[in-house]
């Protein structure tokens, strides 16, 4: 039986190439190190989910020449593929169509900078695809941090993502295209990406509510470098290391 794909979209963590909207107040080197932590946390959580859910782990590498560099960070059993295309929409389409060509029954696409996206939500995404063609984890900024594509959605990826990405209307645009293609859509729990310094306030608040976030490296890095935009919530100590 063919397995579904769990794909993590990642960039090589190089200063000046990742998390540039955090600079300032971060330096390019700090932003790159934060992203390295975010990526490591996302890969660990995704690897566990892939094992439990019976999915094939895929690391989608950008830029393509960074495949070897990122493969060194990939968990055991992950396939590493270069991202292909001039923009994010094209790269997502290419990955989804690769999954379809491999006869994967479904594909989960997630970013590498969503520190609160846990294995349980990935499981709920797989479960949702038993009822809908497209499962979406919305962000508060109008985007999304997780997409689940079922067998009817995968071969339509080129039309599904044929619109500008990284905009305030990307969620609305993707859902609208899905509906025009006759695809059913289901919403998952909301979350957020860490793109701007202000987003760290959301991470601090999430940590205050839940002391077991799936991003120990990220939390420890921010603690040790004292890079939080607000004081840590009272009574919350350093993240537990795994």
Image (tube, rainbow, N blue to C red):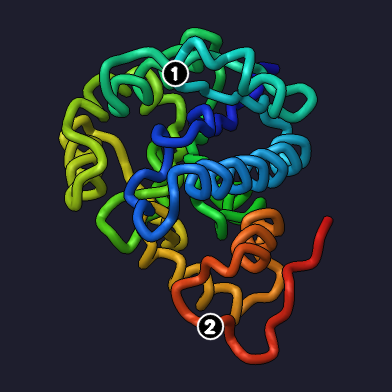
In the rendered image, the vertical position of residue 23 relative to residue 66, given as above or below: below
Report helix, strand or loop for mark 2.
Answer: loop
Name the outermost residue toward the bottom.
234
Q: Residue at x 55, y 10 (%)?
A: 102
Is residue 63 in view from this perspective? yes
Report whether 144 appears left or right of 32. Answer: left
Q: Residue at x 75, y 42 (%)?
A: 48
Identity of the residue drawn at 72% across and 37% down: 47
Q: In this figure, which residue is indicated by the disc labeled 2? A: 231
- The tally of labels here is 2
* Disc 2 residue crowd, few under 14, some 14–19, many 20+, Cα 10 Å: few
- Using the image, tell me which numbered label, if any, was put on residue 230: none
Quadrant where the C terminus sits is bottom right
Where residue 183 sits, quadrant-wise, is top left
Q: Residue at position x 73%, y 68% from top?
A: 239
Q: With 236 as the anchor, is 62 left or right in this view?
A: left
Q: Is residue 212 above or below residue 84?
A: below
Mark seen at residue 63: 1
Other residues around mark 1 within 10 Å, as few (<14) / some (14–19) / many (≥20): some
Lower position in the chain sequence, tag 2 or tag 1: 1
Quick check: 138 above or below 208? above
Nearer to us of marks 2 and 1 is: 2
Q: Position of residue 74 (x, y in %)?
A: 69, 27
Q: Are marks 2 and 1 in contact (CB under 8 Å)?
A: no
The kind of secondary structure element at disc 1 is loop
């Amino acid at each position: 039986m063919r397995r579904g794909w769990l794909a993590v979209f990642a960039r090589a963590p190089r200063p000046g190439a990742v998390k540039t909207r955090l600079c300032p107040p971060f330096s390019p080197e700090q932003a790159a190190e934060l992203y390295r932590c975010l990526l490591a946390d996302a890969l660990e959580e995704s690897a566990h989910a892939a094992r439990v859910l019976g999915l094939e782990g895929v690391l989608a590498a950008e830029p393509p020449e960074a495949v070897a560099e990122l493969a060194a960070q990939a968990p055991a059993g992950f396939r590493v593929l270069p991202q292909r295309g001039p923009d994010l929409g094209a790269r997502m389409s290419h990955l989804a169509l690769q999954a379809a060509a491999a006869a994967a029954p479904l594909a989960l696409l997630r970013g590498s900078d969503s520190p609160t996206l846990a294995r349980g939500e990935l499981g709920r995404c797989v479960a949702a695809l038993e009822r809908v063609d497209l499962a979406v984890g919305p962000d508060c900024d109008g985007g999304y941090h997780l997409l689940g594509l079922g067998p009817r959605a995968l071969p339509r990826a080129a039309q599904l993502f044929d619109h500008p990405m990284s905009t305030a209307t990307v969620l609305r645009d993707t859902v609208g295209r899905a509906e025009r293609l006759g695809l059913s859509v289901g919403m998952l729990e909301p979350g957020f990406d860490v793109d701007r310094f202000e987003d760290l306030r959301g991470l601090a608040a999430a940590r205050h509510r839940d002391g077991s976030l799936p991003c120990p490296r990220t939390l420890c890095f921010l603690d040790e470098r004292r890079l939080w935009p607000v004081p840590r919530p009272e009574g919350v100590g350093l993240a537990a290391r795994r």
